Amino acid sequence: MDLEFAVNGERFKIDSVDPSTTLLEFLRLNTPFKSVKLGCGEGGCGACLVVLSRYDPELDQVKECSINSCLTLLCSVNGCSITTSEGLGNTKKGFHPIHKRFAGFHASQCGFCTPGMCISLYSALANADNNRSKEFTVSEAEKSVSGNLCRCTGYRPIVDACKSFATDVDIEDLGFNSFWKKGESKEVMLKNLPPYNPKDHLVTFPEFLKKKKKEIKNLDNGLDHSRYRWTTPFSVTELHNIMDAANSGDSLKFVVGNTGTGYYKDEERFDRYIDISHIPEMSMIKKDEKGIEIGAAVTISNAIDALEVESKSSYIFKKMAAHMERIGNRSIRNSGSIGGNLVMAQSRKFPSDITTLLLAVDASVYMLNGRKTEKVTLQEFLELSPILDSKRVLLKVEIPSWTAPSGDDTELLFESYRAAPCSIGNALPYLNAAFLAIVSRQEPSRKGVTVDKCLLAFGSYGGDHSIRAIEVENFLTGKLLSYSVLYEAVGLLRGIIVPGKDTSHSEYRKSLAVGFLFDFFGPLIENGHRNSHVDTAKSLPVLSSSQQVLESNEFQPVGEAIIKVGAALQASGEAVFVDDIPTLPDCLHGAFIYSTEPLAKIKSISFRENVTPTGVFAVLTFKDIPQQGQNIGSKTLLGPGPLFADELTRCAGQRIALVVADTQKHADRAAKLAVVQYDTTNLEQPILTVEDAVKRSSFFEVHPMFYPEPVGDVVKGMEEAGRKIISAELRLGSQYFFYMEPQTALALPDEDNCVKVFSSSQAPEYVHSVIATCLGIQEHNVRVITRRVGGGFGGKAVKSMPVATACALGAYKLQRPVKMYLNRKTDMIMAGGRHPMKITYNVGFRSDGKLTALELTMLIDAGLEPDVSPIMPRNIMGPLRKYDWGALSFDVKVCKTNCPSRTAMRAPGEVQGSYIAESIIENVASSLQMDVDVVRKINLHTYDSLRKFYKHISGDPDEYTLPLLWEKLEISSKFKERVEMVKEFNLSNVWRKRGISRVPIVHQVMQRPTPGKVSILSDGSVVVEVGGIEIGQGLWTKVQQMVAYGLSMVKCKGSEKLLERIRVVQSDTLGMIQGGFTAGSTTSESSCEAVRLCCVILVERLKSTMDQMMMEKPSSVTWNMLIQQAYAQYINLSASTLYMPEYSTMEYLNYGVGVSEASHYGKSFILKNLNQSNNNVILLAGGSGPFDRKNRDFKIRYHLRLRKKS
């Protein structure tokens, strides 16, 4: 039978295909639907999500679920219907209500993740509609996108868009949006939401597939093995026959959802793929009084549904189901099977939660061994030699029913535990545990609880697989619980939970095991019962949001809360990113071979077994750079960086070569098969730490303009100090960008020695210059185009340059288009990320908390190349000076090490500077045993001290608003009330604590020269070009609003309604020069001023024509009439400028205050002092993302510190 399926209702029939081809590969390479994106390739980000619909002809029902197309094998969707975000709605047939609400709630910024978000929400809505007993609630709305990553928004507007569909939503709880204005009634709010009706907005299953399913339901509908190498058995007997018929050397791959490849990244090519999901014995669920049997091919989602159904053991089964809902994400659970999870745990040491749960209930498994079926306990199964290396096949799992023995004094207890980096979504646990116990209470005269039986299972702690702590079980059985007994049990447990040698945070994992055991049995000692054992899974805390925005009509449409340009287009997946550009037939693809040594000579580059991998056309190194060119891959004002290592590689992760192949898959595979021979003889040891750099005086020079001057007399300040903290140390680690769109570029050779490059870059002008220098051609031979960037955060500035340059080199040399889409692992290795640093300080202060002096020594790990690292001293000292330290001196060294070069990452230096300041303040408060908020307030600047620390950029006295903001937020956030509530909570709770903090910020803003161009076309529409790049910050929208305002000064009919007639176009380095970097949160501001100046020029040019027409036809001159007349008079209607900020306004200070309350969940209040914004809602949506990122960055560091102390 042929492989046949539907995508968005369109029939696709495939004659032959490599069985390892994923659905994502097919969709992106063979269909016009580009909304499915490759983000991580592991099923963890949600960018690749689609809806899979299967039709059951016997029940005449369609079942739908979201799946990861990056993991799903194409052959497994035979007979199915696939729906992408374009299939829900698009520009031609109209956008779906989901798309409209995502746009209206400003839930799409860069837009790369948005189609996957929309699919997740749609799938949840469809499931709620199909399951009549299940409503789509606020809790379900939040869970619907729990498996999707977004790096821009901070999730608040996304969750608001999802919650707007919930039946129990409080409409007033939803955040700022474009559907209603503040003060409108609930009825008006609901009426203004784009209407959603399941009957109209749910996708139907294609009739041609239904018809085919009905025709073949009684026939063998497996694919033709000779064409697909894919076999579908329909019974255990068939499966056995297939295995028997296979040659002894043949490799077989059993397939259900293929989710395991997201974790293990199998590169092996299998001879045959066997789809076991259609075998009844392996896909059934059977319940009776003895328990429940679940086939090995049953998906985790279906197993959860079965466990949640009421039964005698519903208490334990529901607990298990609740825990399993925290495994992976919804789309992974929809595809991944119970059996696959167990086999990975048994054969490949996968850190499985399911094995731990099943061990705790004494489950058994059935296996096919030859023609025999064997039953063994799960514990025995895990101890077997890897079944992946044998011909045994897991058939099903048997979970027994557990009921408490009769009697009022006996009780059955079950609890499961999981500690992971995040509570839901794709996060593997540090440790999981599940405990079952039967306990009995003594006679009333004798207090206490006796353990009659217990099963204690632990997993994911770094051992080979989940285990039962049998020694502890035996010790506790029959004992009367007491703290001494429990402490003895803990001692035994510590000897059992022994993480492997290379396990991270091993002590933390052991302490978790102890803590879980204590949590389970401790309440029985104190109270004689566990209050929590009757609870089922608790819903996620509801995320609420509230924003207050002051709107003004003075400069309409500037300041209006209009929807971001292209938001609905991004939601439907029609917005074109670089990798979405249709691939030309002769296009080649590139992948980097990078160094695995920090310092070594490169002897040779070859491939494994000296065989050139399939599809490889060339391997380019520094030797292939044109003779007239240079080995340059990046540059900043501070220095260049090489494209490739030469004979010597100077850091692990440095680019050595570019593999060019016929497909991206072949290029990536070839790069992994590359063998690089190194020689380290006669080389000194690499510099891998800042301490090594100091010893060997390995530093980058810092220009005086980037090295601030000290403030005051530190020696005198220290003498005045009543108290001191000497030689305190702080260390800050790095952080990866995880922009959703990896680094990508497409280069096209052009006539006359030219090259055109599409680059996902924040700095196309610099990309342009680097390419020309590398190829040794004039810059007018190079053209770089950037339409939009799928997330940048600084990582698409300098780090985008070598990717585009390598593609340009390949296109120039091979005279064929070359595209590169870095796989996530390579991207992470090369990215560099945020600067790690070591800080040592001395601080002097008085007994009342007033600071007198601060001395800092700072070592910054810049890595191999200068990049932007020499500006770090200036960036760090800006926010660090937000407090009046009395006097401030510092010694900052930018260290050159044999590590990947660090680069600008969202507020580079500012994040670290603010953190350093707050850490010192908290240390001072702690040493004085004072409230840290009091210490902060005492040391806020007066205007005089502000002038002392910030000099000419401090502005006028009335511009210094930080003290006012400090007091204002105290009132609006009810800070004092919250502090008392936190204290009361902490006194009442032994194990859980809360904290609250109020923090100021002083941000040093610096504007840069920025170009702009505005052109009015003959029909009156307007096209605009700016140097700034749209990265999701809404730059195009703000520019559009400014142009509409600027041109409205013509004051003719229709000029006040120009907004919809303005289009901002992509950046083109030959059309708009001197674009510079898009960074520092000022590009939108500068771009708006540039186009405003253009509008002033155009309005002035149109003035005489307007005056003349007004004399002839008073009060009847329209915009179109004016422009037609101007064209007839050959007036130049294109104006360009380069906005140059005046020295007096180039730098200024912004102030803000934030209050955050933290516990299991938290609340945050942020108050910023801003001038009129071009678009407040875009500002709000853009503000929550950076806050969330910084929050997560320091949460990671805090948790790591806790682990080290535990």
Image: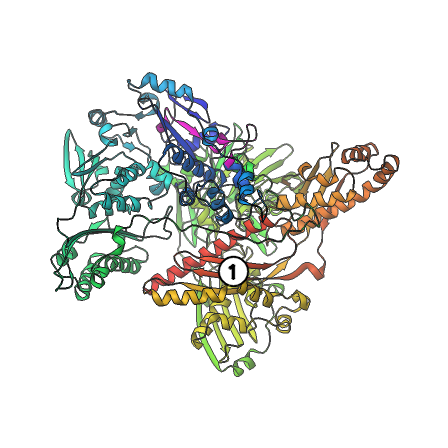
Q: Is residue 313 above or below residue 835?
A: above
Percent across and percent down for residue 486 are 19, 62
* Residue 729 image position (x, y, % from top left): 44, 70
Q: Is residue 92 magenta?
A: yes
Quarter of the image where one finds residue 90: top right
Residue under the image location 36 percent in, 68 percent down: 987
Relative height, residue 203 to residue 321 (above, below): above
Q: Amino acid at mark 1?
A: Val
Q: Magenta residues?
A: 75-97
Q: Is residue 909 visible?
A: no
Q: Is residue 436 magenta?
A: no
Q: Residue at x 16, y 44 (%)?
A: 380
Specify the quadrant that holds the N terminus: top left
Q: Please name the residue shown 70% across and 56% down the image.
A: 1141
Residue 68 lies in what quarter of the image? top left
Q: Secondary structure at mark 1?
A: helix
* Residue displayed at 46% across by 72% down: 931
Residues 464 and 179: in front is: 179
Relative image position of residue 703 (x, y in whole percent): 61, 63
Residue 798 seen in the figure? yes
Please give the residue where the numbered disc 1 appears in the rendered image: 911
